Amino acid sequence: MGNSSADETVIDATSPIQASTSHADTSDETRSTTGLTRTLSRTLSMTSRVKYKVYKRRFFGLAQLILLNIVVSWDWITLAPVSSTAATYFNTTESIINWLSTAFLFAFVIATPLTFWTLSKHGPKMAITISSCLLLVGNWVKFGGAKSNNFGVVMLGQLLIGFAQPFVLSAPTTFSDVWFSPSGRTTATAVASLANPFGAALGQLITPFWVSQPSDIPNSILWVSIIASVASIPSFFIPARPPTPPAANVDALLAAENPGSKSIKHDLHTLFTSVEFYLLFIPFSTYVGFFNAFSSLLNQILEPYGFSEDDAGIAGAVLIVVGLVTAAITSPLNDRYKFYLWFIRISVPVIALMYLIFIFSPPTKSIPYVYVVCAVLGAASFGLVPVALEFLVEILHPLGPAVGSSLCWSGGQLLGGIFIVIMDALKDGDAADPPANMHRSLVFQAVVAMLVMPLPLCLGLFGRKRMVRLRRWEAEKAGEVDVDNTAADQSGNENVEGRITI
């Protein structure tokens, strides 16, 4: 069309749907494509021409989600790369400093029920707004505590920021479902989700350069607080949802028009009775938990072997940046070719193997060796995150994405906090060789990583292949039937018209 935006894909569809008051069966079979269309045909009555569009304004909301995820993760790891210097400033121990990261992760878990209620009932806009408010308050409380050398106030600010994190970290799957077409959802989820560890990479890399002595701690927190304030303000201006749905997914259309139409209790029951959910949830939570613990403790893992805080910061940045580059390559490929399951089956063994290999990395005192292992671990871990989240949405369709995503992230944060406590407790004493080394912690990490590795490899096996079908994608393809290409506009876009037969 001559008046369409350069990035818009438009499908005009006429959908005659018969009304009825009967309810759909809730069995697995009725959640197939045929069952879904029949269910909707009995519960809706509309005869209208629906336009399926993607709008340029979606990138404004996506950019804001990216900014908030960067800032909230940077806040999480602010003092971890300089834990020994921070301990000196606050006149405490590194183990107490570790509790800033641990409490932050536990705060995520506490806020999770409110998160998936907000996403399910009010959509991503409300979640983003709540997160921004908590970030603004939390950062300035944290700075006030640091400036007055009051560790308790710093912890209070850290907890407020921890409450903010789930609202933006769990939002990408819901945001991409509402705003993006099937050809861009995995990429959108990847960019928004992986912005979170990118913030941790910035913290790992930049904070050691800001902090050269204990008195620099308040100023480092001040700079992060300023950045967080600037990043939070645009949240209040993003649109709540697009004027028209992005794809021929009538279920998504209903959720956009009436976010409270789905029962959270029903979604939870469905998730907790799904074998496939556990096969993804357990390894996802475990590996996210170990990433959180590993990132928080990396300086303490490497320091006993003669590595500097700068070396540990660069290693953490390598872990994350290589992972982000990998995800930037693999996510669009998954959007196009939908090889979610095979990607999971390849990535998970690589992650477990890297945790095993890393046991032997610090004693070599070779920083290139550490960098290489971190790079491979980051590539496999970061490539897996958006793929696993989108795959879960696909196979559990027509469930909304909010609850599953929130639970997966919550499990990762909970285990991250637990792993930090355990790995800190396993640290050797000053009489060890070298003093205060974390060899036993790395062994614990590798053993647990190897134990959960077989779970996702079982997806689709033992007669359950039909349970790993891409149900959302199938439903959308079923909706886009009898599509006739008409004319391309001057910019080369196609104006596509079709009829949904339900």
Image (spheres, helix red, strand yellow):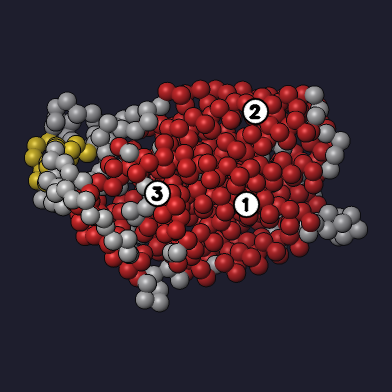
Number of disc labels: 3
Label 2, label 3: how far apart the Cα atoms are? 35 Å
Asked whether the beta carbons under mark 2 and mark 3 sit within 8 Å of each other, the answer is no
2 or 1: mark nearer the eye: 1
| Quadrant into which the N terminus falls | top left
Residue 487 % position (x, y): 9, 37
Which residue, given by chain and number where applicable, does mark 1 sit on?
414
In the rendered view, does 392 fall on the left or right side of 42? right
Q: Amino acid at mark 1?
A: Leu
Q: Nearer the viewer, residue 109 or 451?
A: 109
Residue 227 occupies which quadrant of the picture?
Answer: top right
Secondary element under disc 1, as helix, strand or loop, is helix
Instruction: Decide which of tag 2 and tag 1 comes sooner along the chain.
Output: 2
Q: Nearer the viewer, residue 158 or 353?
A: 158
Instruction: Decide which of tag 2 and tag 3 comes sooner along the chain.
Output: 2
Label 3: how many Cα within 10 Å (few below 14, some 14–19, many 20+)? some
Q: Residue furthest front?
A: 21
Residue 260 % position (x, y): 38, 41
Secondary element under disc 2, as helix, strand or loop, is helix
Residue at x 27% of width, y 38% of height: 245
Which residue, given by chain and number where applicable, does mark 2 sit on?
139
Residue at x 37% of width, y 57% of height: 396
Q: Amino acid at mark 2?
A: Asn
Residue 457 % position (x, y): 47, 69
Label 2, label 1: how far apart the Cα atoms are? 22 Å
Secondary element under disc 3, as helix, strand or loop, is loop
Which residue, given by chain and number where applicable, does mark 3 sit on?
263
Residue 432 occupies which quadrant of the picture?
Answer: bottom right
Residue at x 77% of width, y 53% of height: 424
In the rendered view, does 379 fall on the left or right side of 63? right
